Amino acid sequence: MSVRTQGGDRRSAAEILSGAKSVATYLLAACVVLGVWWIVAHILYAVRGYSVLPTPAETFRLAITLRGDLAPAFGNSALRFLISIVVAFVLAVPFGLVVGFSRRLHQYVSPLVFLTYPIPPVALLVFLYMAFGTGEAVRVFVVTIALFFQLLVAAMGAARQIPPSFVTSVRSAGATKWGLYKHVVLPATLPSMLTAARVSVGLGITLLYIAETRIGAVGGARSGLGVFIKVHSHAPAEYELSAVVGLALMGLVFYTALELLDRWLCRWRHVGGGGGT
Amino acid sequence: MIEVADLSVAYGTGRRRVLAVDRVSLSVPTGEMGALVGPSGCGKSTILYAVDGLIPPTEGTISVADEPVHGVRRDVALILQDAGLLPWKTVRQNAELALRIQGVGEDVADILNTLGLTGFENSFPAELSEGMKRRVGIARALALHPRVLLMDEPMANLDSLTREHIQKLILDLWKSLRFTALLVTHDIEEAVFLGRHVFVLSRRPARVVEAIANPEAGTAAYRGSDTFVQRVRYLHELLGGVQ
Ligand SMILES: Nc1ncnc2c1ncn2[C@@H]1O[C@H](COP(=O)(O)OP(=O)(O)OP(=O)(O)O)[C@@H](O)[C@H]1O
Ligand SMILES: [Mg+2]
């Protein structure tokens, strides 16, 4: 009894420690980014003789003044991104896993996927714009389609990498096709899927920025960080920078959320000596 | 009773066709243990998979307890090479996998206790020693009280102490539960120590080179005896000729 409690305590202590460590590394990274930004701003000022790049302090001062505009912009952009990544995940993962897990399906479907995969979603923007106008749906759609392909390709790959011994062991226990998905395919590929989602956060935010700045921003459309940048394109650089900081923060939020999800859902990867992180 | 008659198994088709098992016949009477020995890659696992109903025979027939095998059966369990545990499931979840899949609401506490795994129910495979993993694999196979237990090298890649421990464990379980067993091993001494019927296989495609009756198997005293030593030597010569 006491041994087990002790083990439990040690584990949670280790978890807290690693949690504190990752918070510390994030803080350190933030300091480095701000430091570099500050140095570059000063160098540019010295070289040019006038302010090219506002300093972090100037930017944050403005951001606080404009928080009434920036906060809803952040919220709207984050909501668009959240909808996109959830919809893309829910559509791409089951489809990709089924295709990747079946040799026959993979043979027929993969050429189709790899032909369409390299088309940059931005290239479709003009057509979408003409076909569906400048509404909310088109913005979300562009981001969704980009994330969908990223996750689809990752899911197809992950399903093909599943060691046959896992499949054999579950089949030997009498599993049906659905049982194979439940006990092997889904849990075996979940870590790769979460990693793929994390990796595509950057791409998704880039596309969100493009969608928000390119597609008719002002007329009636709801705000967003990209929209904010477009609206203030003639204002001093602090305006744009404060929204860029918002985009970076947004990426960090989603990235961290996905990492926490991985720690929670794939706890088995983070125990024992090997594997994990 | 396990009855394999003229079993042939081929993988792939056309030019990529590989014959893994070639007209193998063998039988293990109810409640006894048979051992398959043969060079690596000869088709031992394939034979077990076919008996488990995972692979359909290309030719020949298999029956267990006088019923033909067509697909996976509840009364036949398989312990996979390297235990085949799912890393995302805890010890308990791994052990009760077949129960959950078959919708049996039984508990695995007893079998985990028998195998000395109490206290590790919530550990993941990555947290276990190699010997413990093998024991979880055994627990999983026995959870459904199978009539037939198929074991694919359950002692491979273990240090000699753990190996002897697992051998003894399997022997004790077999004595108390009296399942019919078919054990695959590439260790000749192990085959002679455990297998009342030893089937020596050729290189791929697997053929039965000789079936050896070994009635003394399964007793602790047998290991040091002259008969044991002679049989082991004989098998060495036989397999030496095969390889
Ligand atoms: N899924 C498969 N597709 C094609 N060939 C296969 C497949 N599985 C096994 N084989 C081939 O069949 C032969 C027998 O394989 P099997 O795994 O039954 O041998 P084994 O005696 O168990 O080997 P080991 O001692 O390595 O466990 C091998 O030559 C292998 O290459
Ligand atoms: Mg094998």
Image (cartoon, coloured by chain):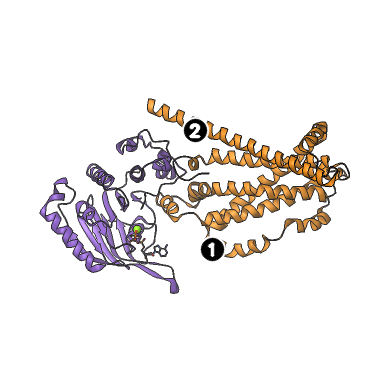
Chain colours: A orange, B purple
Disc 1 vs disc 2: Cβ atoms closer than 8 Å? Answer: no
Horizontal and vertical percent for residue A113? Answer: 64, 61
Q: Chain of mark 1?
A: A
Quarter location, residue B241: bottom left
Q: Is residue A127 above or below residue B105?
A: below
Secondary structure type for disc 1: helix
**Is B155 positioned to the left or the right of A175 in the image?**
left
Q: Residue at x 35, y 43 (%)?
A: B144
Residue where numbered disc 1 is placed: A104
Quarter location, residue B131: top left
Q: Chain of mark 2?
A: A
Q: Identify residue type, mark 1.
A: Arg
Q: Identify residue type, mark 2.
A: Ala
Q: Residue at x 73, y 56 (%)?
A: A121
Residue placed furthest toward the bottom: B15
**Is A228 positioned to the left or the right of B72 in the image?**
right
Quadrant where the N terminus of chain B sits is bottom left
Disc 1 residue crowd, few under 14, some 14–19, many 20+, Cα 10 Å: few
Horizontal and vertical percent for residue B85? Answer: 41, 47
Quarter location, residue A264: top right
Horizontal and vertical percent for residue B230? Answer: 13, 58
Residue where numbered disc 2 is placed: A14
Q: Is residue B186 visible?
A: yes
Name the residue nearer the viewer: B64 or B132: B132
Earlier in the chain: of badge 1 and badge 2, it is 2
Q: Is residue A147 above or below residue B5?
A: above
